[in-house]
Image (cartoon, rainbow, N blue to C red):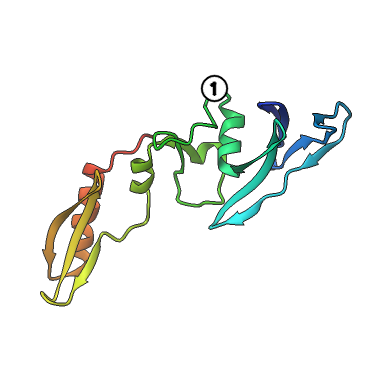
Amino acid sequence: MIEFVLKDRRLRLYPDGTITCRVIRSGKETKNDIWNKIKFTNNKGYLRCVISLDGVPVSFYQHRLLYFAHNPSWDIFDNSPNNCIDHKNHDKTDNTDGNLRVVTSQQNQFNTNAKGYTWNKHERKWKAQIQVNKKMMGLGTYEKEEDARAAYLEAKERLHIIPP
């Protein structure tokens, strides 16, 4: 079990992924041994909960709470584009510590299952493209779908650099 603190609240993370917190009574955290399980709801595939901090309800995604529990020096309250949590294996429900990492918003977008190519009806060819720094780059047109896919994957490996 890992015990961690969010402002005025103590939380516990158990090996099965359950997170609990103490009850709030009269605006203060109780000191007894009663810990309530935090309930998460599905929000577009991500699990989200609401925790009262300093009397104010604050929404948290489960993957951010779990990353914070394992990395208490990380700023969970920094919602800037340079402080995203990425799921390495693309599975939004796999919140294991080894699957989570801090990335920029752009690096988070790199780690998608994008196809990287489309069928161009006018040219009757496959068109490969990739986005870098908010700019779309054409990678050429191809007779075969697999060639367009290969061009995209090569460019993705070269241009989309994601930390380990």
Residue that appears at 67% across and 27% down: 4
Q: Nearer the viewer, residue 119 or 98?
A: 119
The residue pinned by badge 1 equals 73
Name the side, left or right, on which 59 lies relative to 25: left
Considering every residue shown, the one lying at the far right of the view is 32
Which quadrant is the N terminus positioned in? top right
Q: Is residue 128 visible?
A: yes
Name the side, left or right, on which 34 lies relative to 118: right
Residue that appears at 61% across and 56% down: 42
The disc labelled 1 sits on which kind of residue? Ser
Q: Nearer the viewer, residue 35 or 81?
A: 81
* Numbered label tally: 1
Q: Quadrant of residue 8?
A: top right
Residue that appears at 37% across and 52% down: 112
Q: Nearer the viewer, residue 11 or 97?
A: 11
Tell me: residue 140, above or below residue 6. Answer: below
Q: Is residue 1 visible?
A: no
Residue 69, given in percent of the width and then of the height, sits at 62, 31
Tell me: residue 85, above or below residue 2. Answer: below
Tell me: residue 54, above or below residue 84. Answer: above
Residue 6, given in percent of the width and then of the height, sits at 65, 29
Residue 114, given in percent of the width and then of the height, sits at 33, 58
Residue that appears at 52% across and 27% down: 75
Considering every residue shown, the one lying at the far top of the view is 73
Q: SS at mark 1?
A: loop
Q: Residues within 10 Å of mark 1 (few under 14, many from 20)?
A: few
Which quadrant is the C terminus positioned in? top left
Residue 110, given in percent of the width and then of the height, sits at 33, 47
